[in-house]
Image (cartoon, rainbow, N blue to C red):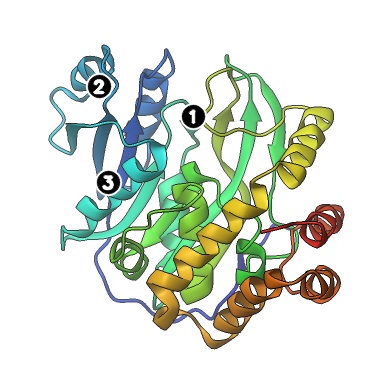
Amino acid sequence: MDRLQADGHTLTGEYGDRVAVLLSTYRAGPFLKELLESLWAQDYQSAQFRVRDDGSGDETAHVVREQLSGRADASLVVGEHLGPGQSFLALLAEAASDPAVGYAAFCDQDDVWLPGKLSAAVEALREVRGPALYCAAVELVGPELSRLKVHRRCTRGPSFANALVENIATGCTIVLNRPGMDLVSSCTPLDFIMHDAWCYLVIAGCGTVVYDPRPRVLYRLHGSNAVGVGATPWAEWLGRLRRHFSEDHLGALTRQARELERLHRGDLKPGAAHCLEEFLSAQSRLGSRLWYAINGSAHFQRHLDSALYRLAYATYRP
C-alpha cells in the first residue's frame, strides 16, 4: 500500500486552513481553461486563487480575466516578465503577506488537478509543526490527456542530502504550510534552478518534507513545457544523461547550494548544515572531489543516477 514518506517528525500545527492557490501564467496555450475547471472542481472549501501573468504581452491576461470573471475567490495581477521561478516566488511572497492564509499551493497553467488534491495535501500537513512542504507523484499524460504512466520520483524518501542534487518536488504538486511559506519568502534567492527545487532544498534543510506516492496531478507533456520529463524510458534516460553531464549542471547545483548557505545558514538543522558544508568544501581540490564522489552523502533517489552523479562530480572542475 502507498504510504506518505516524510523526513521529519509530525506534531500539531496551529494556523488557519485557507489555501492560496498560486498560478503564474506566461503565453498560455489552449490548456488553461481545463486547468481552471479542475481547480474549481476541488472539494476543499477554503481556497483562494491568485494568478500572476508574467508579462506575456499577448492575450493571456485577457483570457485569464474572462475565466476569473464573477469569482470573488480569484484575483489577477499583471506583472513584468521575471521567468517562472521568480514569478512563483513573487506570488508566494504576496500570499505570505496575508495573515489569513495558512497554506500555499503552486499550480502550472497546462496541467489538470485530480479530485481531492488540495484536501490530501492539507490533511498531510495539518499535524506538522514548523516549516513543511507536501509534494506528490504525477501521472504523465499527452496533450489530449491520454494516460501514459505514473511518474513517482521518490523511492528512497525525501532528505536534504537528496535535495542538494535532485528535485523530487514537482512544482504543480507542492503545498507549503504557513511556517514553510514564511521561511521561503523571508529571503529572495538570486541564483537558483527553479522555484520548486529551491523550496525542496530550503524545507528539506530546515523543516519537514512529506511525499505522497499517489498521483495528484495529470502532468501534460507537450512541446512547450517549461520543464518536463520524458514520456518514454528512452527519452527519460537521454534527459538524465544530458543533465548529469551537461557543462553547467553541477555548477548550477553548487550555486544554488551556496545561495542556501548565504540566506539560510542559521535556519538549517545541524545534520543539514554539516551535509551542506561537506558538499561545498569538497569541491576545492581534485583529491577532495574524488573522496566525496565515493563517500559523500548527496544522492539521487535511484542508485544508477547516484552512480552517474558521482562520476560527474569526480570529474567536475569548479
Q: Which residue is at 44% across, 49% downward?
A: 195
Three-letter code, disc 3: Leu
Disc 3, SS: helix
Q: Quadrant of residue 212?
A: bottom right
Q: Position of residue 211 (x, y in %)?
A: 59, 59
Q: State the mark number for residue 64.
A: 2
Front-lying residue, 290 or 27 = 290
Q: Is residue 146 above or below residue 88?
A: above
Q: Label 1 crowding class (10 Å Cα cut-off): few <14, some 14-19, many 20+?
A: many
Q: Which residue is at 27% across, 13% downward?
A: 58
Q: Which residue is at 44% across, 78% downward?
A: 265
Q: Is residue 20 above or below residue 25?
A: below
Task: Measure how far apart labels 1 and 3 are at the Cα level.
Answer: 19 Å
Q: State the mark number for residue 91.
A: 3
Task: Assign the N terminus to one quadrant of the image.
Answer: bottom right
Disc 2, SS: helix
Residue 138 lies left or right of residue 109; in this view the side is: right
Disc 1, SS: loop
Q: Label 2 crowding class (10 Å Cα cut-off): few <14, some 14-19, many 20+?
A: many
Q: Which residue is mark 1?
A: 111
Q: Position of residue 218 (x, y in %)?
A: 56, 32
The reply to whether the C-beta atoms of the residues labelled 1 and 3 are less than 8 Å apart is no
Which one is earlier in the sequence, the residue at label 1 or at label 3? Answer: 3
Front disc: 1 or 3: 3
Three-letter code, disc 2: Val
